[in-house]
Amino acid sequence: MEIDIDNELEKNYEKLQEEKLIDLNFVKPNKDCTQGCDNITDNNYVCFECEEIQVREKYPNAKYTDDCEWVLDK
């Protein structure tokens, strides 16, 4: 079975247009994190586990996409 790549890309694009990207400016490093959050430097790096917890607390229905983005259904 052959897959029509252009058709699949178009479907994915249309799906992404129906979803809303979440602005992650509210996500902050967790000072008690043992997974890799960075509170020491100016990076303010947040590990994925802490990011996921904070996003899900604020947006319980958020989805993490294959494009590595948090989205909400419209």
Image: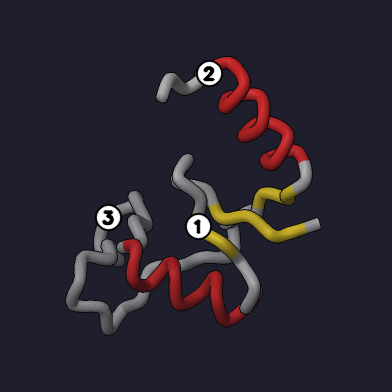
List the single residue furthest toward the right: 74
Q: Residue at x 43, y 66 (%)?
A: 51
User: Which element is circle 1 on?
Assistant: strand
* Amino acid type at image mark 2: Asp
Q: Is residue 61 left or right of residue 3?
A: right
Q: Which mark is residue 41?
A: 3
Characterize the local packing of mark 2: few (<14), some (14-19) or many (20 or more) Cα atoms within 10 angstroms: few
Answer with the quarter of the image where residue 56 lies: bottom right
Q: Which amino acid does the dot numbered 3 rest on?
A: Thr
* Disc 1 target residue: 64
- x and y percentages locating residue 73 in the rendered image: 73, 59
Q: Which residue is mark 2?
A: 4
Q: In the image, is residue 14 above or below residue 5?
A: below
How far is the residue under mark 3 from the one under mark 2?
47 Å
Vertical order, 63 against 9 (above or below): below
Q: Position of residue 17 (x, y in %)?
A: 75, 38
Residue 19 location in percent, x, y? 73, 49
